Image (spheres, rainbow, N blue to C red):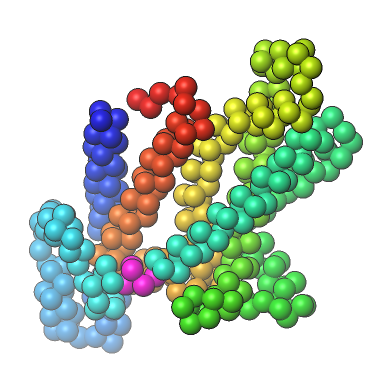
Amino acid sequence: MRYLYKKFLSALLTLLISSILTFVIFNVLPGDPAQVILGLDASEAQLTQLRESMDLDSPALYRYFNWLENAFQGDLGVSYKYQREVSLLIADAMKVTMQLSIYSLLLTLLISIPFGLLLVSKRDKKSFIPLSILSQVGMSIPSFCLAIFLIAIFTVQLQILPSIGYVSFLSDPIENFKSLLLPSLSIAIGASSIVVRYLNTSVQQQLKKDYVRTAYSIGLKEKAVLYQHVLRNALIPVITIVGLIVADILGGSIIIENVFNLPGIGKLIKSSITSRDLPLIQALVLYLSFIVIVVNFLIDILYKVIDPRIRIK
Protein backbone atom coordinates (compact mmCIF):
# COMPACT_ATOMS: atom_id res chain seq x y z
CA MET A 1 0.00 0.00 0.00
CA ARG A 2 2.87 2.38 0.85
CA TYR A 3 4.42 1.59 -2.54
CA LEU A 4 1.22 2.56 -4.38
CA TYR A 5 0.95 5.76 -2.35
CA LYS A 6 4.55 6.73 -3.20
CA LYS A 7 4.00 5.91 -6.87
CA PHE A 8 0.84 8.02 -6.96
CA LEU A 9 2.59 11.03 -5.40
CA SER A 10 5.57 10.59 -7.72
CA ALA A 11 3.25 10.47 -10.74
CA LEU A 12 1.44 13.65 -9.68
CA LEU A 13 4.75 15.45 -9.13
CA THR A 14 6.07 14.33 -12.53
CA LEU A 15 2.93 15.49 -14.32
CA LEU A 16 2.99 18.82 -12.47
CA ILE A 17 6.66 19.50 -13.29
CA SER A 18 6.08 18.50 -16.94
CA SER A 19 3.17 20.92 -17.26
CA ILE A 20 5.13 23.77 -15.60
CA LEU A 21 8.17 23.28 -17.85
CA THR A 22 6.01 23.14 -20.97
CA PHE A 23 4.14 26.30 -19.97
CA VAL A 24 7.33 28.22 -19.12
CA ILE A 25 9.14 27.20 -22.33
CA PHE A 26 6.25 28.24 -24.56
CA ASN A 27 5.84 31.56 -22.76
CA VAL A 28 9.51 32.57 -23.04
CA LEU A 29 9.76 31.67 -26.74
CA PRO A 30 9.39 34.62 -29.12
CA GLY A 31 6.27 34.88 -31.26
CA ASP A 32 2.57 35.60 -30.97
CA PRO A 33 0.05 32.72 -31.20
CA ALA A 34 -2.58 35.15 -32.49
CA GLN A 35 -0.23 36.26 -35.28
CA VAL A 36 0.54 32.64 -36.18
CA ILE A 37 -3.16 31.80 -36.41
CA LEU A 38 -4.36 34.90 -38.33
CA GLY A 39 -1.25 35.43 -40.44
CA LEU A 40 0.87 38.47 -41.21
CA ASP A 41 -1.96 40.32 -42.98
CA ALA A 42 -4.17 40.49 -39.85
CA SER A 43 -4.98 43.94 -38.47
CA GLU A 44 -4.12 45.00 -34.93
CA ALA A 45 -7.83 45.04 -34.05
CA GLN A 46 -8.22 41.43 -35.19
CA LEU A 47 -5.12 40.39 -33.25
CA THR A 48 -6.36 42.14 -30.10
CA GLN A 49 -9.78 40.50 -30.39
CA LEU A 50 -8.25 37.04 -30.82
CA ARG A 51 -5.84 37.54 -27.90
CA GLU A 52 -8.78 38.48 -25.67
CA SER A 53 -10.82 35.47 -26.81
CA MET A 54 -7.85 33.16 -26.08
CA ASP A 55 -7.15 34.90 -22.75
CA LEU A 56 -3.59 35.71 -23.87
CA ASP A 57 -3.68 39.18 -22.30
CA SER A 58 -4.02 37.74 -18.78
CA PRO A 59 -0.89 37.27 -16.60
CA ALA A 60 0.98 34.02 -17.32
CA LEU A 61 0.67 32.78 -13.72
CA TYR A 62 -3.09 33.29 -13.76
CA ARG A 63 -3.42 31.43 -17.08
CA TYR A 64 -1.37 28.49 -15.79
CA PHE A 65 -3.35 28.04 -12.57
CA ASN A 66 -6.60 28.48 -14.47
CA TRP A 67 -5.51 25.73 -16.87
CA LEU A 68 -4.39 23.52 -13.97
CA GLU A 69 -7.73 23.92 -12.17
CA ASN A 70 -9.64 23.02 -15.33
CA ALA A 71 -7.30 20.08 -16.01
CA PHE A 72 -8.08 18.56 -12.60
CA GLN A 73 -11.75 18.75 -13.61
CA GLY A 74 -11.05 16.96 -16.89
CA ASP A 75 -11.19 20.08 -19.08
CA LEU A 76 -7.93 20.47 -21.02
CA GLY A 77 -9.13 23.48 -22.94
CA VAL A 78 -9.76 24.30 -26.59
CA SER A 79 -7.09 24.22 -29.29
CA TYR A 80 -6.10 27.66 -30.58
CA LYS A 81 -5.61 26.35 -34.11
CA TYR A 82 -8.36 23.74 -34.55
CA GLN A 83 -10.98 25.36 -32.29
CA ARG A 84 -11.91 21.92 -30.97
CA GLU A 85 -11.66 20.42 -27.52
CA VAL A 86 -8.10 19.27 -26.95
CA SER A 87 -9.21 15.96 -25.42
CA LEU A 88 -11.16 15.10 -28.61
CA LEU A 89 -8.20 15.94 -30.86
CA ILE A 90 -5.87 13.80 -28.77
CA ALA A 91 -8.36 10.92 -28.63
CA ASP A 92 -8.53 10.81 -32.44
CA ALA A 93 -4.75 11.02 -32.85
CA MET A 94 -4.02 8.59 -30.00
CA LYS A 95 -5.85 5.78 -31.82
CA VAL A 96 -3.24 5.92 -34.58
CA THR A 97 -0.24 6.37 -32.28
CA MET A 98 -1.29 3.57 -29.93
CA GLN A 99 -1.72 1.17 -32.86
CA LEU A 100 1.69 2.17 -34.19
CA SER A 101 3.26 1.78 -30.73
CA ILE A 102 1.66 -1.64 -30.13
CA TYR A 103 2.71 -2.94 -33.56
CA SER A 104 6.23 -1.57 -33.01
CA LEU A 105 6.52 -3.17 -29.56
CA LEU A 106 5.26 -6.54 -30.82
CA LEU A 107 7.69 -6.46 -33.74
CA THR A 108 10.48 -5.45 -31.36
CA LEU A 109 9.82 -8.49 -29.17
CA LEU A 110 9.34 -10.81 -32.16
CA ILE A 111 12.70 -9.71 -33.60
CA SER A 112 14.77 -9.22 -30.45
CA ILE A 113 13.97 -12.37 -28.45
CA PRO A 114 14.75 -14.97 -31.19
CA PHE A 115 17.75 -12.95 -32.42
CA GLY A 116 18.98 -12.45 -28.85
CA LEU A 117 18.71 -16.17 -28.10
CA LEU A 118 20.52 -16.94 -31.37
CA LEU A 119 23.30 -14.53 -30.41
CA VAL A 120 23.62 -16.15 -26.97
CA SER A 121 23.72 -19.67 -28.42
CA LYS A 122 26.52 -18.62 -30.83
CA ARG A 123 28.59 -16.84 -28.17
CA ASP A 124 31.56 -19.23 -28.48
CA LYS A 125 31.40 -19.61 -32.28
CA LYS A 126 32.75 -17.62 -35.23
CA SER A 127 29.24 -16.54 -36.30
CA PHE A 128 28.89 -14.53 -33.05
CA ILE A 129 30.96 -11.60 -34.38
CA PRO A 130 28.93 -10.89 -37.57
CA LEU A 131 25.67 -11.31 -35.64
CA SER A 132 26.92 -8.91 -32.98
CA ILE A 133 27.97 -6.37 -35.63
CA LEU A 134 24.54 -6.67 -37.25
CA SER A 135 22.81 -5.80 -33.98
CA GLN A 136 25.19 -2.86 -33.49
CA VAL A 137 24.41 -1.53 -36.97
CA GLY A 138 20.66 -1.81 -36.34
CA MET A 139 21.07 0.19 -33.14
CA SER A 140 23.15 2.91 -34.82
CA ILE A 141 20.91 3.81 -37.76
CA PRO A 142 18.26 6.49 -37.00
CA SER A 143 14.65 5.42 -37.44
CA PHE A 144 13.93 8.01 -40.15
CA CYS A 145 16.88 6.69 -42.21
CA LEU A 146 15.52 3.16 -41.86
CA ALA A 147 12.11 4.50 -42.92
CA ILE A 148 13.54 5.94 -46.15
CA PHE A 149 15.45 2.71 -46.81
CA LEU A 150 12.31 0.58 -46.28
CA ILE A 151 10.23 2.88 -48.50
CA ALA A 152 12.85 2.55 -51.26
CA ILE A 153 12.64 -1.26 -51.08
CA PHE A 154 9.01 -2.11 -50.33
CA THR A 155 7.24 0.86 -51.96
CA VAL A 156 9.45 2.03 -54.82
CA GLN A 157 11.08 -1.25 -55.89
CA LEU A 158 8.69 -4.03 -54.85
CA GLN A 159 5.52 -1.87 -54.75
CA ILE A 160 3.85 -4.08 -52.14
CA LEU A 161 3.41 -1.67 -49.20
CA PRO A 162 2.17 1.94 -49.04
CA SER A 163 4.53 4.70 -47.92
CA ILE A 164 2.01 7.34 -46.85
CA GLY A 165 -1.48 7.51 -45.39
CA TYR A 166 -3.49 5.61 -42.82
CA VAL A 167 -6.43 3.22 -43.10
CA SER A 168 -8.67 2.67 -40.07
CA PHE A 169 -8.71 -0.82 -38.57
CA LEU A 170 -12.52 -0.82 -38.55
CA SER A 171 -12.78 0.02 -42.24
CA ASP A 172 -10.19 -2.52 -43.44
CA PRO A 173 -8.01 -4.50 -40.96
CA ILE A 174 -5.63 -5.79 -43.66
CA GLU A 175 -5.03 -2.37 -45.20
CA ASN A 176 -4.65 -0.96 -41.68
CA PHE A 177 -1.86 -3.44 -40.98
CA LYS A 178 -0.20 -2.70 -44.32
CA SER A 179 -0.33 1.06 -43.72
CA LEU A 180 1.40 0.65 -40.33
CA LEU A 181 3.87 -2.13 -41.18
CA LEU A 182 6.67 0.03 -42.60
CA PRO A 183 6.40 2.68 -39.85
CA SER A 184 6.41 -0.06 -37.20
CA LEU A 185 9.44 -1.77 -38.74
CA SER A 186 11.29 1.56 -38.91
CA ILE A 187 10.94 1.89 -35.13
CA ALA A 188 11.24 -1.81 -34.23
CA ILE A 189 14.56 -2.52 -35.96
CA GLY A 190 16.48 -0.03 -33.85
CA ALA A 191 14.56 -0.86 -30.67
CA SER A 192 15.08 -4.61 -31.07
CA SER A 193 18.82 -4.10 -31.59
CA ILE A 194 19.01 -2.36 -28.20
CA VAL A 195 17.11 -5.20 -26.50
CA VAL A 196 19.38 -7.78 -28.16
CA ARG A 197 22.53 -6.03 -26.92
CA TYR A 198 21.24 -5.80 -23.36
CA LEU A 199 19.98 -9.39 -23.39
CA ASN A 200 23.36 -10.64 -24.59
CA THR A 201 25.24 -8.60 -21.95
CA SER A 202 22.88 -9.76 -19.21
CA VAL A 203 23.25 -13.43 -20.20
CA GLN A 204 27.05 -13.12 -20.29
CA GLN A 205 26.99 -11.72 -16.73
CA GLN A 206 24.72 -14.51 -15.51
CA LEU A 207 26.95 -17.20 -17.01
CA LYS A 208 29.74 -16.11 -14.64
CA LYS A 209 27.58 -16.72 -11.54
CA ASP A 210 28.13 -19.61 -9.11
CA TYR A 211 24.70 -21.17 -9.70
CA VAL A 212 25.60 -21.77 -13.37
CA ARG A 213 28.77 -23.64 -12.44
CA THR A 214 26.75 -25.64 -9.92
CA ALA A 215 24.15 -26.51 -12.57
CA TYR A 216 26.85 -27.76 -14.93
CA SER A 217 28.54 -29.73 -12.14
CA ILE A 218 25.37 -31.73 -11.39
CA GLY A 219 25.13 -32.78 -15.03
CA LEU A 220 22.57 -30.39 -16.53
CA LYS A 221 22.85 -29.88 -20.28
CA GLU A 222 23.75 -26.46 -21.70
CA LYS A 223 20.27 -25.81 -23.12
CA ALA A 224 18.64 -26.63 -19.79
CA VAL A 225 21.01 -24.31 -17.92
CA LEU A 226 20.60 -21.53 -20.48
CA TYR A 227 16.83 -21.57 -20.99
CA GLN A 228 15.59 -22.76 -17.59
CA HIS A 229 17.91 -20.83 -15.28
CA VAL A 230 20.13 -18.24 -16.95
CA LEU A 231 17.54 -16.68 -19.25
CA ARG A 232 15.01 -16.12 -16.48
CA ASN A 233 17.52 -14.20 -14.36
CA ALA A 234 18.90 -12.38 -17.41
CA LEU A 235 15.45 -11.07 -18.33
CA ILE A 236 15.13 -9.00 -15.14
CA PRO A 237 17.46 -6.15 -16.19
CA VAL A 238 16.22 -6.46 -19.79
CA ILE A 239 12.68 -5.66 -18.64
CA THR A 240 13.93 -2.25 -17.52
CA ILE A 241 15.19 -1.63 -21.04
CA VAL A 242 11.83 -2.72 -22.50
CA GLY A 243 10.19 -0.09 -20.28
CA LEU A 244 12.56 2.54 -21.68
CA ILE A 245 11.97 1.18 -25.18
CA VAL A 246 8.24 1.94 -24.82
CA ALA A 247 9.11 5.58 -24.12
CA ASP A 248 11.56 5.47 -27.04
CA ILE A 249 8.85 4.06 -29.32
CA LEU A 250 6.52 6.91 -28.36
CA GLY A 251 9.31 9.37 -29.11
CA GLY A 252 10.19 7.63 -32.36
CA SER A 253 6.57 7.64 -33.48
CA ILE A 254 6.61 11.46 -33.42
CA ILE A 255 9.23 11.49 -36.20
CA ILE A 256 7.98 8.43 -38.08
CA GLU A 257 4.38 9.66 -38.21
CA ASN A 258 5.57 12.76 -40.04
CA VAL A 259 7.68 10.68 -42.45
CA PHE A 260 4.73 8.42 -43.34
CA ASN A 261 2.08 11.16 -43.03
CA LEU A 262 0.13 9.35 -40.29
CA PRO A 263 -2.56 11.38 -38.45
CA GLY A 264 -1.24 10.54 -34.97
CA ILE A 265 0.21 12.30 -31.95
CA GLY A 266 3.43 13.06 -33.84
CA LYS A 267 1.71 15.17 -36.46
CA LEU A 268 -0.37 16.82 -33.74
CA ILE A 269 2.78 17.75 -31.79
CA LYS A 270 4.39 19.23 -34.90
CA SER A 271 1.25 21.22 -35.66
CA SER A 272 0.88 22.47 -32.07
CA ILE A 273 4.52 23.61 -31.90
CA THR A 274 4.52 25.44 -35.24
CA SER A 275 1.24 27.21 -34.38
CA ARG A 276 2.22 27.83 -30.71
CA ASP A 277 -0.96 26.04 -29.65
CA LEU A 278 -0.25 25.99 -25.89
CA PRO A 279 -3.42 24.17 -24.68
CA LEU A 280 -2.79 21.38 -27.17
CA ILE A 281 0.94 20.94 -26.50
CA GLN A 282 0.40 21.02 -22.72
CA ALA A 283 -2.24 18.31 -22.96
CA LEU A 284 -0.03 16.22 -25.25
CA VAL A 285 2.89 16.40 -22.80
CA LEU A 286 0.50 15.45 -19.99
CA TYR A 287 -0.86 12.43 -21.89
CA LEU A 288 2.57 11.15 -22.96
CA SER A 289 3.99 11.61 -19.45
CA PHE A 290 1.06 9.67 -18.02
CA ILE A 291 1.61 6.78 -20.46
CA VAL A 292 5.32 6.55 -19.55
CA ILE A 293 4.45 6.59 -15.82
CA VAL A 294 1.91 3.78 -16.25
CA VAL A 295 4.39 1.70 -18.28
CA ASN A 296 7.08 2.08 -15.60
CA PHE A 297 4.58 1.03 -12.94
CA LEU A 298 3.67 -2.09 -14.93
CA ILE A 299 7.39 -2.88 -15.35
CA ASP A 300 7.82 -2.76 -11.55
CA ILE A 301 4.95 -5.23 -11.15
CA LEU A 302 6.41 -7.47 -13.86
CA TYR A 303 9.67 -7.66 -11.90
CA LYS A 304 7.74 -9.28 -9.07
CA VAL A 305 6.01 -11.74 -11.42
CA ILE A 306 9.27 -12.91 -13.02
CA ASP A 307 11.20 -13.12 -9.75
CA PRO A 308 9.08 -13.29 -6.55
CA ARG A 309 12.25 -12.72 -4.50
CA ILE A 310 12.31 -9.08 -5.61
CA ARG A 311 10.70 -6.75 -3.08
CA ILE A 312 8.95 -3.66 -4.41
CA LYS A 313 9.75 -0.73 -2.16
Give the residues drawn in magenta, as a range: 89-93
Tell me residue 52's x, y (percent). Answer: 11, 74
Quadrant in which residue 176 is drawn: bottom right
Above or below — where is 145 with respect to 40? above
Q: Nearer the viewer, residue 200 or 223?
A: 223
| Location of residue 144 (image quadrant) | bottom right
Which quarter of the figure is the N terminus placed in?
top left
Q: In which quarter of the image is the C terminus?
A: top left
Q: Is residue 155 left or right of residue 60?
A: right
Say left or right for 177 vs 78: right
Q: Which quarter of the figure has residue 120?
A: top right
* Residue drawn at (25%, 55%) of the image: 23
Q: Can residue 266 be seen in this view?
A: no
| Residue at x 71% of width, y 22% of height | 207
Q: Is any atom of residue 236 visible in this view?
A: yes
Relative to 44, does residue 122 appear above or below in the rendering? Answer: above
Q: How many marks?
A: 0
> Residue 298 in magenta?
no
The extreme right residue here reads: 126
Q: Residue at x 33, y 68 (%)?
A: 91
Residue at x-position 67% and y-position 42%? 196
Image x and y of residue 263, in percent = 45, 74
Whether 92 is among the magenta residues is yes
Residue nearer the viewer, 169 or 144 = 169
Residue 142 spot, x, y in % from top left: 63, 56
Tell me the chief SS of the magenta region. helix
Q: Where is residue 228 shown, x and y percent of the image?
A: 67, 29
On screen, residue 245 versus residue 193, left or right, reads left
